Amino acid sequence: MKLRIPLGVTAGLSGILAAAAVSVPTPASAAELLINNYLPPKHPFQLGIVEPWIKDVAAATKGSVDAKLSAAAVGPPPKNWQTVTKGIADLVLLANGFQPNRILLPTISHIPFNSPSAVKTSMALWNSELKYFHKADEFKGAKLLGSFTGSSNYLYTGKQAVESFSDMKGLKLRTSSGVTTTIVEQMGGVAVPSSPSKIFGLVSKGVVDGLTAPGYGLRAFRVLPYVKYATVVPGGFTNTSFTWLMNKKKWDGLTKEQQAQVMSVSGEVISKHTAKVDSMSAAGLDALKKAGGKVVSPSAEFVTSLKKLADAAEAEWLAGAEKKGIDGKAALAYYKSQLK
């Protein structure tokens, strides 16, 4: 015998079942992370670090953490510390030179001869952070996910190759702020610090005689037609370090499992991703050669003179590290041991 349920009861039962379905817990929605997107689409950091990290995080968290690039920059690069700590963006790629009063320790990689490649230097920085630098808590207020560098800066000029120390005298070069500017001035050159966005105008209009930049910068900054010589300093002329930072409240809002998953594809993994940066820098130098340019090595006298300036810069770094409560000598020796 079939049980007949009156129409009204059926409707009521359907409503109860629908309400019950709504009340059943559903999987939590993905934690969304907004990245301050200020880099050009084909910049090596975008192709080699940011985009791979986004994919790695999605895979590691099985989609429970969703990192996305902002449609346009939500803050200028010099203000990235404020952008991330104030929550304007959840993630930023910060050039450490923009925070000279806060961040010192990673700048050991800025000093001449201390950055043979992006991969080696980045690995050395991250390992040094874990073993020594973290005690100083330089990134207090944000969550540090990675520490890395670009490829070594070399000297690029349009009219005359830089081979001897005297070739630097009076030479006007676009530089990044910090150690690079100081070293160029100590060598007798005229430093013109600027943001990357101004490089093309300075070089193409002849405001400067050349620039200091990684090899990838020749094409990234569109200055290849104006450069005829590249002076490649073994171990790097100088460099610039960067950090991958996350808003602290956003980090604390992730589950412990999500935090572990995110870190499993950060830190050392980010450092290894800089292999893309090195390959693009090598391609930049190859493009210069194909365009008729020359890649030269500095003289022994140039290297010796630059070494004295590097030693002085290291002494200054050591003094700063000691003030931060770090065993500077041990940290420096450990960092250098990984560059070989």
Image: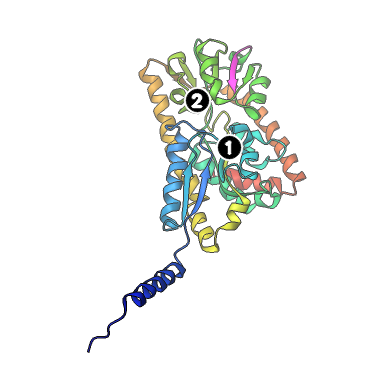
Callout 2 secondary element: loop
Circles 1 and 2: CB distance less than 8 Å?
A: no
Note whether residue 340 is visible.
Answer: no
Residue 46 appears in the picture as rendered: yes
Label 2 crowd (10 A; few <14 / some 14-19 / many >=20): many
Quickly name the residue at label 1.
Answer: 241
Mark with earlier residue (1, 2): 2
Residue 95: image quadrant is top right
Picture residue at 66% right of the left edge, 29% below the top? 178
- The N terminus sits in image quarter: bottom left
Report x, y in % for residue 5: 31, 81
Please provide the residue range marked out in magenta: 170-175
Amino acid found under the numbered disc labelled 2:
Val
Would you say residue 110 sits in the magenta stretch?
no
Q: Position of residue 286 (x, y in %)?
A: 38, 25
Q: Which residue is mark 2?
A: 232
Query: Residue 164 got which mark?
Result: none
**Residue, far left:** 1
Q: Quadrant of residue 302?
A: top right
- Which residue is more in the foreground, 335 or 100? 100
Query: Front-most of 125 and 248?
Result: 248
Q: Is residue 262 above or below residue 191?
A: below
Residue 49: percent from left, percent from top: 46, 42
Q: Residues within 10 Å of mark 1 (few under 14, many from 20)?
A: many
